[in-house]
Image (spheres, rainbow, N blue to C red):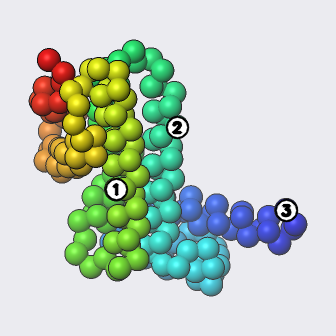
Amino acid sequence: MNKKQLQSEQTKKRVVEAARILFAQKGYKATSIEDIVAATGSSKGNLYYHFKSKEGLFLYLIDEWDREWEEKWQEKEPLYKTTTEKLYGFAELLVHDDLNHPLTKAADEFFNSEDKTTEVEERVGELVDRHLQWNQRLIQQGIDNGEFRQGSAGEHAVILESLLIGLSQMSRKKSPDEILELYKQAMKVFLYGIADS
């Protein structure tokens, strides 16, 4: 990497770090491009060189969060013997990550915004598709090892993702213990529906 590329990467990192802090502190809507520029000492041109828009920058942060979550899961997954145990562990990790991640509130605001661009809609669709593929692989594991009855892992993946998205929206005002219990109960209901009795 030459000097110019190194400086460009350092600028990008500064922008990402400043944006993460501002979005966590102020929320998505209240954070402006000018705020990010002021926090980094960089120019708007530098910011737009790396990210097409504020939305693009926020989606980059969401992608980073998703990758971090996957890394955490890869560390935890070997601790579970069965797919059923994995699904409960998955739900628990989701709850803890969601409750403790600094961008949770800003992400809720971002995803519930009505004025999303087509590009944002497409990127959100890609994110959901990745989650569905992940869910489907996990459910297919359970089918293959005889824990779950034969059926469409793809359809069950959609149901699982819908359940989790709904839970994250409906449980915001509950205590951490109540949220965790709600997720465990939801997973129990889901598993009851697909278990190979």
The percent position of residue 73, horizontal first and vertical second, equals: 45, 33
Relative to 102, residue 38 above or below: below
Label 2 packing within 10 angstroms: few (<14), some (14-19), many (20+):
few
Residue that mark 3 sits on? 1
Mark in front: 1 vs 2: 1
Q: Nearer the viewer, mark 3 or mark 1?
A: 1
The label on residue 139 is: none
Q: Earlier in the sequence, mark 2 or mark 3?
A: 3
Element type at marker 1? helix
Helix, strand or loop under label 3: loop
Residue 16, given in percent of the width and then of the height, sits at: 56, 62
**Closest to the observer: 152 or 114?**
152
Name the residue at the right extreme. Answer: 2
- Residue type at mark 3 is Met
* Residue farthest to the front, as pictured: 150
Picture disc at residue 71: 2
Relative horizontal placement of residue 108, taking residue 60 as reference (left or right) = left
Q: Earlier in the sequence, mark 1 or mark 2?
A: 2
**Residue 78, can we see it?**
yes
Q: Position of residue 38 (x, y in %)?
A: 56, 75
* Whether label 1 touches label 2, CB < 8 Å: no
Q: Return the x and y of residue 177 as percentages of the image width and height.
A: 20, 27
What SS does tag 2 mark? Answer: helix
Q: Residues within 10 Å of mark 3 (few under 14, many from 20)?
A: few
Instruction: Give amino acid for label 1.
Output: Val
Residue occupying the point 17% across, 30% down: 194
The amino acid on which the numbered mark 2 sits, given as a three-letter code, is Glu
